[in-house]
Amino acid sequence: MASTLAYRLRRAFSNPAWICFVWFGLTAGISLLATPVRFASSELARDVKFEVARIVFTALNKAELIALVLFLIVIRVSGAAARWWAVAGLLVMIVMAQSVFLLPELAERADMVVRGIEPPPSYVHAAYSTLEMTKLAILFVTGIVALGWERGSN
């Protein structure tokens, strides 16, 4: 019984579906639920909303970097790296673009708002949002495909 449980857990954790759905839930919860609700609040001052958003998205980015590393480890250890290399490459490019280029720019813009300066118009938020939605779609579809792949390998 214990060996059967250990085997089932090992198989479950070697499937990338679990990390895709955990990562999807984390990102969707913050990007699609918590952030719009925070900015819809009339009780918070604009500068407070931006300061909280900057802190939350910095923390989300760190969690996503951990999720990305876990995803890469899972697909490598599972022996299915060849199957998932394109998805892994897309996720790496998206997370790195957000981490290295877009989030620092958005953080600077949020700091400007907190200091009472209106930032000039920019494409950065639209680019970040587009990549965020693309990442969510990739994670969701990959999770579903990985579940089907697991069932098909039984």
Image (cartoon, rainbow, N blue to C red):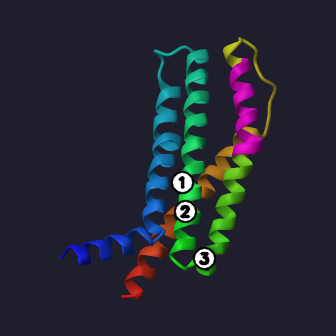
**Can you identify the residue that label 3 sits on?**
81
Question: Is residue 136 in view from this perspective?
Answer: no
* Chain part drawn in magenta: 99-112
Query: Crowding at label 2, few (<14), some or many (≥20) Cα neighbours within 10 Å?
Result: many
**Up-down relation of residue 133 to residue 3 (above or below):** above
**Can you identify the residue that label 2 sits on?**
71
Residue drawn 56% across and 50% down?
66
**Can you identify the residue that label 1 sits on?**
67
Q: Quadrant of the C terminus?
A: bottom left
Mark 3 secondary-structure assignment: helix
Q: Amino acid at mark 1?
A: Ala
Outermost residue on the front side: it is 3
Q: Amino acid at mark 3?
A: Ala
Q: Earlier in the sequence, mark 3 or mark 1?
A: 1
Q: Nearer the viewer, residue 21 or 72?
A: 72
Mark 2 in CB contact with mark 3 (< 8 angstroms): no
Q: Is residue 101 magenta?
A: yes
**Up-down relation of residue 104 to residue 25 (above or below):** above
Mark 2 in CB contact with mark 1 (< 8 angstroms): yes
Q: Quadrant of residue 111?
A: top right
